[in-house]
Image (cartoon, grey):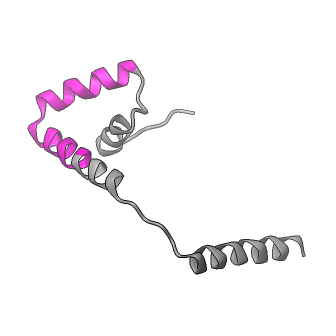
Amino acid sequence: MINKFTLEEQIIRFIFNELNFEESANLMTTLIADEELYEMYLNFSTTYDEVKKVEYTPSSKSIENILYYAKAASLQSKN
């Protein structure tokens, strides 16, 4: 199976360190040559860095609701 990724998807995969060496080298060459794509990379990278800073602790009630739903869905699929 051959995966075809858009340049945007390649940039995201690069940020998440999901490219092999050859793919990374090719993308870096493309980013150096294309200022618009480089700007996209910077925007994606900045956004990723900001998202990593977000901390969220769901309420106990939210967790209970999720667990209840999961249990109900599990029981329903057995019927």
Of 67 and 21, nearer the camera is 67
Provide residue 26's location: percent of width, then percent of height.
28, 23
* Residue at 64% over, 79% down: 65
Q: Which quadrant is home to the N terminus?
A: top right
Q: Relative to 35, does residue 28 appear above or below in the rendering?
A: above
Q: Which residues are magenta?
A: 21-45
Provide residue 77's location: percent of width, then percent of height.
82, 71
* Residue at 59% over, 76% down: 60
Provide residue 28's location: percent of width, then percent of height.
23, 26
Of 5 and 42, nearer the camera is 42
| Number of numbered discs visible in the structure rendering | 0
On whether residue 77 falls in the magenta region, the answer is no
Q: Is residue 51 left or right of residue 57?
A: left
Q: Relative to 30, does residue 56 appear above or below in the rendering?
A: below
Splitting the image into 4 quarters, where does residue 61 fall?
bottom right
On whether residue 43 falls in the magenta region, the answer is yes
Q: Relative to 40, does residue 61 appear above or below in the rendering?
A: below
* Residue at 76% over, 74% down: 73
Q: Residue furthest left?
A: 35
* Residue at 30% over, 45% down: 8
Report the predominant secondary structure element of the magenta stretch: helix
Provide residue 49's location: percent of width, then percent of height.
28, 47
Q: Which quadrant is home to the C terminus?
A: bottom right
